[in-house]
Amino acid sequence: MEVNAKACLLNAAWGAWYPKGTDRLVRSAIHHGWEHDILTFKNEMINEYFDPNQPYTIKAAALVEAIRRGYRYILWADCSCWFVDNPNRLMQIVDEENGYFIKSGYNLAQTSADSDLVWAKASRDDAERLDEVWSCLFGVDTQSARGVKFVGEFLSARDAGVFGTSRNHNGSSADERFLHARQDQTACSWAFY
């Protein structure tokens, strides 16, 4: 990791049980030896990228805020996550690979509404060949070429309404391959590609 580069574990919570999840995540990171900063937001209007009507935009807002605060290496973890072993290896991967992403088991034809495909400028056939990645745990080097592109596309998806699609099928596509939209996960996946 570049000397003097700032790194953090990032999380944001809004309502319901989520702030308790943030607390559990932080406790687990500390317990297992997290060596970097921890940046969390609980029930805060973080910045202009957060729209409470589209709750998952909180990830875009938190990512922007971390970058504004000078963090280069960012490991996002959802409120439902907690560590059971030393999490520092994940940050090493972010450094070495310019990111850390895990496949979810779906493909993007299954989890992209038609409007998502319009934004991504992709067909459902294109989407079927791409694995969805999780947005519950991912890492990015925000200053690498790959990281700059990822952040730009993630925020573009936010602006295009990808974070606001319905979790229900609700007619978001007539294609039989479509199962349900995944909002931030769909955005994260398309940004990854």
Image: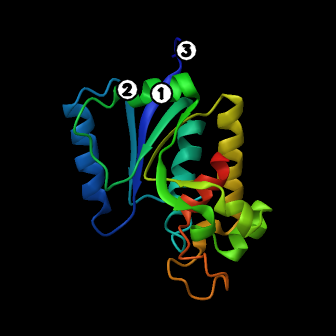
The picture places residue 1, in percent across and down from the top left corner, at 51, 16
Q: Which mark is residue 133?
A: none
For badge 3, the amino acid type reads Glu
In the structure shown, which secondary structural element does the residue marked by tag 3 occupy? loop
- Dot in front, 1 or 3: 1
User: Which one is in front, 190 or 36?
Assistant: 190
Q: Are marks 1 and 2 in contact (CB under 8 Å)?
A: yes
Q: CA distance from mark 2 to mark 3?
A: 16 Å
Q: Is residue 158 visible?
A: no
Identify the residue position indicated by label 2 in the image.
Answer: 89
As drawn, the residue found furthest toward the left would be: 31
The picture places residue 144, in percent across and down from the top left corner, at 66, 28
Identify the residue position indicated by label 3 in the image.
Answer: 2
Vertical placement of residue 95 versus 76, above or below: above
As drawn, the residue found furthest toward the top would be: 3
Left or right of 146? Residue 111 is left
Identify the residue position indicated by label 1 in the image.
Answer: 93
Q: Are marks 2 and 3 in contact (CB under 8 Å)?
A: no
Vertical placement of residue 21 versus 125, above or below: above
Q: How many C-alpha atoms fall within 10 Å of the one at disc 2: few (<14), some, or many (≥20)? A: few
The picture places residue 7, in percent across and down from the top left corner, at 47, 27
Instruction: Give the residue at x 53% y 19%.
Output: 5
For badge 1, the amino acid type reads Ile
For badge 2, the amino acid type reads Arg
Q: How many C-alpha atoms fall within 10 Å of the one at disc 3: few (<14), some, or many (≥20)? A: few
Instruction: Give the residue at x 45% y 23%.
Output: 92
